[in-house]
Amino acid sequence: MSEAKIRKQKIKKDSVKMRLVIFGTLALLLLLASIFAEQLAHCDPYLQDLSNAKAAPSMAHWLGTDRYGRDMLSRVIAGSRTSIYSTLLLVAIVTVTGTAVGTVCGFWGGWVDTVLMRISDIFLAFPGLVFAMAVAGVLGGGLQNAIIALAAISWPKYARIARSRTLTEKEAPYIRAARLAGCSTPAIILRHILPNIIGPILVTAMLDIGTMMMELAGLSFLGLGAKPPAAEWGSMMSDTRSLLPTAPWVTLSPGVAIFISVMIFNLLGDTVRDWADPKSRGR
Amino acid sequence: MEAVLAVEGLTKIFKTKGRADTVAVDHVSFSLMPGECLGIIGESGSGKTTLVNMVTRLLAPTEGCIFLDGQEITGLKGRELREAWRRMQMVFQSPAESFDPRRTLGDGIGESLRNAGAGREETKRETARLLKACGLTPEYAGRYPHEVSGGQCQRAAIARALAIKPKLLICDEATSSLDVTVQQEIIELLGRLRRKQDGLAILFISHDIALVQQFCDRVLVMYRGRIVEQGKPDDVIRDPQDPYTKKLIESIL
């Protein structure tokens, strides 16, 4: 390989690392903002001030106030806790259950595999958000039920990835070597199979954070997620959409917040995928 | 003296829907004495690897019995089978793939020791000793499989196989993926280790008749799942009886 080519590869590798640092930091900032939402918000997000309703953005209220005179900036920051926290919780639930089911199916095969995979087929056969609406409708509104509904439709994707990766890995010679070394089946799954299949699953999870955030906001927008007055970006947009012509900042600020966070998590997911790809890593 | 490994009437039939059954291994019987080195040669598809997989219990036989050290291991499961594996280890054909790509060589070598209850320090010391005995430096314990050459990786694989001092070492085409000079080094290493560890029996699977002649005390020739000829390597090569063996030897000369 020529020196120039090596240098080019090195630059590419470095730029992936750079992007990882940038987007990782941004995502971390979002997380910190959601954790310290109460300290960051300079006004009480639930404090009403009807004399100052629908005020345009000013020095006192950077993003203006809504129809009850509540400070929008504080509400957006407070909403980040609900939105980001519940999204991450949802992604974590889905990743863990999906991976567990898929690994078990791939490793044992037989009737366990058939039964669990047919169940996942049933979930995959429904149009996702419609099914989630049905579930949320049956269980009633509320953020917790929205999470349950979205988890129910999202796990099969992870189960499929985990299963197909397990199927290829379990026949590898190093698994047979581990057997001969006296590892029990749980030890083989935890110590050898999981570390080798987790890469693509984590990348999918990262890429899904954005989608899940949108879907949660979507359910809230439809009134099946967080209930007012709780500050949640989706329901905030839904409640105030009639104000769009007269006080656009009230609708737009949670919308922009969703847009920015979804974009940051999507870009982070893309970067993690590039970074996890062994071809882009130094061998 | 009791045989380390005895195999009686071992058969494997692969059933595929809509097609005739494939008889991969057909009533194979042989035994292996302590300290002996038995070679099995045959073309690809002759059932060598299927035979080995059954002997190591990684594949269930259709018929037949396997005795390790006088104990029948054909039906063992779980803990008992893991006990049996302590006396029987294997070196695989593809060295790099036989190590977990996400773990260091040292992790792989020490795994059987840790599973047998050895502590962290003890495992580390033993791993270093094994690496040295196999012609590598202890630093290799920290390397990943893709960072070393095929020959070095195979040395580490031999170190791993010998870690819990097995009575039987199975080499399934252990030298086939290496180039000729490295092949020779690995063979010399195996010979040295065999002299060092008294009573280590080796089952040496190969398609290279010259290697088998150089290294083994006895040889079995497999063809289409059956043993067609056996004897001392020199005798088999000088005076082959079976038509397939004749063809095999003619093809080399």
Image (spheres, coloured by chain):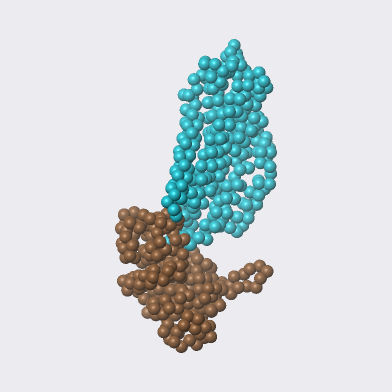
Relative to the observer, which residue lies in front, A154 or B82?
A154
- Residue at screen point 63% across, 38% down: A149
- Relative to the observer, which residue lies in front, A178 or A21? A21
Query: Relative to B240, is B89 above or below?
Result: above
* Quarter of the view holding residue B103: bottom left
The residue located at (48%, 43%) in the rendering is A16
Quadrant occupied by the N terminus of chain A: bottom left
Place residue A205 in its image quadrant.
Answer: top right
Name the side, left or right, on which B171 lies relative to A78.
left
Residue B13 appears at what percent x and percent y?
58, 72
Give the residue displayed 60% in from the left and 55% down from the top. A113
Q: Is residue B234 visible?
A: yes
Q: Is residue B19 above or below residue B105?
A: below
* Whole-percent x, y for residue A25 in the image: 46, 35
Q: Position of residue A261 (x, y in %)?
A: 55, 33
Residue A281 is at least partly visible in this image: no
Q: How many marks?
A: 0
Residue A140 at x, y percent in the picture: 65, 33
- The colour of chain B is brown
The chain coloured cyan is A
